Amino acid sequence: MTVKPSAARANGKVNLHLGVGEARSDGYHELSTVFMAVDRQEIVALIPEPGADVTCGVVAGMCTSFHVSEPDEDLATPNNLAWRAVNAICAGADVEPVRIEVDKTIPVAGGMAGGSADAAAAIKAAVGYMAQHGVDVPADRVQAVAAELGADVPFALMGGIALGTERGDALVPMMGRGEYWFAFLNPGVGLSTGKVFEHLDDMRFNSASVVPKMDTTLLSRALLSGDPVQVGAAMHNDLEAAALSLQPRLHTLIRDAEKAGAIRAMVSGSGPTVAALCPDRETALAVVEELTRDGSAEGFVACGPATGATLL
Ligand code: C5P
């Protein structure tokens, strides 16, 4: 049997609402979050390498083409979410080893779930690869692997707009009208997701006024209006205070994005990327142009809602 490469793509996301509740015993926090997928994509291809030397699983190696800043650390390790995703989906099956190739346009550790998009695309590509070998991976197995890999992976598979509760991975699709144009600005400073959550816990411990905002009613109404001004007014991120406290220069980026024409700029997820919602594509392009001119941030325009992970 000739086995062909199998490839899939998955989009990044922005949390239009991110309410962070209690810390749980499993190290995660209860969330009440509204995800929107945006059309900034990762492509993951599995290239068959018949006879390659593989110590564990089916993955013989991995390489990434970066269309965003390259991180200092090596991403091509068995710990990588895409690597783990392929091994999990193909576990126990008699299939040819593969090399993983990733085409990356979402900032690494940026708060846009780039790693989770890699995982979701890798899951889809691996399901396609298994199908070539005559193996049908059941949908509940796909969901279980996604949730095991990370709290944002199930949404990266699903796309669109969704309310996420529990760890953010219990998803219900949400209705929304219209399209939303964002300027995404990445100042290239590191912010670890776990550290930002921890810092929020510390801030809450020290001040009774830092309370969770779990109610998403205002945002769901705004999304039905299709009006970016209403959506901008309803955007909220409980993690923003913690991200700003750890990286105070994000204040300037937010202020300057709004000065340059954004309706509302906010830290995306745990940051450090700033998501600046704009009235239209032209304004989003102008905001990116203005804020990246001096080289202090990297930026791009993306539009939501976008699709979930798709086999190519
Ligand atoms: O799921 P993921 O591995 O992307 O999460 C990274 C870290 O972010 C977790 O280890 C945890 O510290 C924090 N987190 C959290 N609550 C969530 C999601 C993430 O505390 N719901």
Image (tube, rainbow, N blue to C red):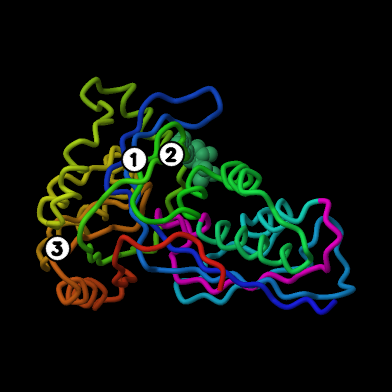
Question: Are dots 1 and 3 in contact, CB under 8 Å?
Answer: no
Q: Amino acid at mark 1?
A: Thr
Q: CA distance from mark 3 to mark 2?
A: 27 Å
**Dot in front, 3 or 2:** 2
**Front position in the image: 218 or 263:** 218
Q: Residue 262, labelled with which disc?
A: 3
Q: Quadrant of residue 226?
A: bottom left
Which residue is at a point 36% across and 46% down the rendered structure image?
173
Secondary structure mostly taken by the magenta-highlighted segment of the chain: loop
Question: Are dots 2 and 1 in contact, CB under 8 Å?
Answer: yes
Alpha-carbon neighbours of circle 1 within 10 Å: few (<14), some, or many (≥20)?
A: many
Q: Is residue 133 left or right of residue 24?
A: right
Q: Amino acid at mark 2?
A: Gly
Q: CA distance from mark 1 to mark 3?
A: 22 Å
Residue tagged 2: 168
Residue tagged 1: 33
**Front position in the image: 230 or 108:** 230
